[in-house]
Image: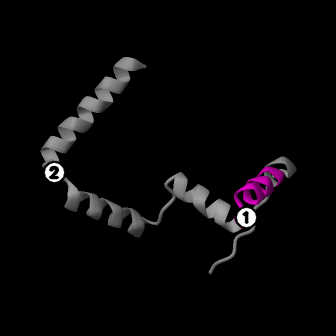
Amino acid sequence: MPRLTITLSDERYQALKEAATKSRKSLVTVIDESLDFYGIKTGRSAAELVAQARKRAILSEDEALELAIQEVNSYRKQV
């Protein structure tokens, strides 16, 4: 497994340690889960997720695109 060195502020490091302690997880686990939460994935992982979603999709590609456009337009009207 590759290793990574990062520099955090004292406050950020303390918050990370507290979060790990409260959740009874290691610092590595908390960081790894945070990366997952923010969608940080390899290109291959992302492609696998898209392939799985396409297998389960009930809409055609055109229908899905139309729905996406409607949702974006609806959101823009709210903002």
Mark found first going from the N terminus, 1 or 2: 1
- The residue under the point 73% across, 64% down is 27
Residue 71, image x, y percentages: 29, 31
Q: Secondary structure at mark 2?
A: loop
Check the image and report above or below for 78 versus 21: above
- Principal SS element in the magenta part? helix
Residue 20, image x, y percentages: 73, 59
The stretch of residues the image draws in magenta is 14-27
**Which image quarter: residue 7?**
bottom right
**Which image quarter: residue 23?**
bottom right
Q: Is residue 57 left or right of residue 27?
A: left
Check the image and report above or below for 5 versus 67: below
Which residue position is annotated with label 1?
Answer: 27
Q: In front here: 31 or 43?
A: 31
Whole-number angstrom distance, CA of label 1 to CA of label 2: 40 Å
- The residue under the point 68% across, 67% down is 28
Q: Which mark is residue 58?
A: 2
Q: In front here: 16 or 70?
A: 16
Q: Quadrant of the N terminus?
A: bottom right
Three-letter amino acid code at the position of disc 2: Ile
Q: Which mark is residue 3?
A: none
Check the image and report above or below for 42 versus 79: below
- The residue under the point 64% across, 78% down is 2
Q: Is residue 47 left or right of residue 12?
A: left
Q: Quadrant of the C terminus?
A: top left
Three-letter amino acid code at the position of disc 1: Leu
- The residue under the point 21% across, 36% down is 67
